[in-house]
Amino acid sequence: MRFWLMKSEPSDCSIDKLAELPDQTVAWYGVRNYQARNFMRDQMNIGDGVLFYHSNCKQPGIAGIAKVCSTAYPDATQYTRESKYFDPKATPEQPRWFNVDVKLVKKIDLIPIDDLRKYPELVRMRTLQRGNRLSITPVDPDEWKFITTRLANA
DNA sequence: GCCAACGTTGGC
DNA sequence: GCCAACGTTGGC
């Protein structure tokens, strides 16, 4: 079992919107970065833990706990000409982009990025490193444990 | 909305 | 296969 941090822009899909979706599950479509794709395609398994992170918004931070609930499959939006995620080089025979499904476990009181930076236990977190832009990053088991047991108040 | 950081593209 | 130009990300 692995752990991940996955960024979502609240204007696109917030934790509250996720909570209202059927089965509280969302397809993590639209990832167009190879490293992030490879994490989903090659390393994620059903049941993996997910820190649901709000990015590019007024209060960035961890907004909830979720889990991976499918293995990776081709991202449908890559074939949709009208989509901003359309990729002319992708074909159903040779898909380029993949996504998993993510299911809400619980919403928590938002842990702002400022708070995350306060703890020595978290200084090495990938997502807190300077210049990091990856929308999906692995989370160490120790970091996961610290965040979910010490910081997360539902 | 600024801008530093970083990934991707494409000419050579 | 180098690298300059360009586009995107995301905290601030």
Image (spheres, coloured by chain):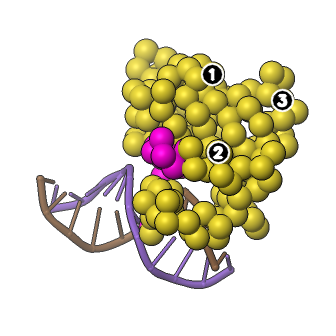
Chain colours: A yellow, B purple, C brown
Q: Which residue does the image show at 81% across and 45% down from the upper left?
A: A154
**Outermost residue, right direction?**
A20
Within the image, what quadrant is residue A99 found in? Answer: top right
**Outermost residue, front direction?**
A150
- Amino acid beneath label 2: Thr
Which residue in the structure is indicated by mark 3?
A: A21
- In the picture, measured across the screen, residue A115 lies left or right of residue A38, that is right
Spatial distance from mark 1 to mark 2, Cα to Cα? 19 Å
Q: Nearer the viewer, residue A32 or A109?
A: A109
Image coordinates of residue A116 in percent, x first then y, are 60, 63
Question: Which secondary structure, mark 2?
Answer: helix
Crowding at mark 1 (Cα within 10 Å: few <14, some 14-19, many 20+): many
Is any part of residue A64 visible from this angle?
yes
Spatial distance from mark 2 to mark 3, Cα to Cα? 23 Å
Spatial distance from mark 3 to mark 1, Cα to Cα? 14 Å
Question: Which secondary structure, mark 1?
Answer: loop
Residue range of the region highlighted in magenta in the rendering? A131-144
Circles 3 and 1: CB atoms closer than 8 Å: no
**Image vertical order of residue A22 relative to residue A121, above or below:** above
Which residue in the structure is indicated by mark 1?
A: A69
Which residue in the structure is indicated by mark 2?
A: A148
Q: Nearer the viewer, residue A36 or A124?
A: A124
* Subunit of label 3: A
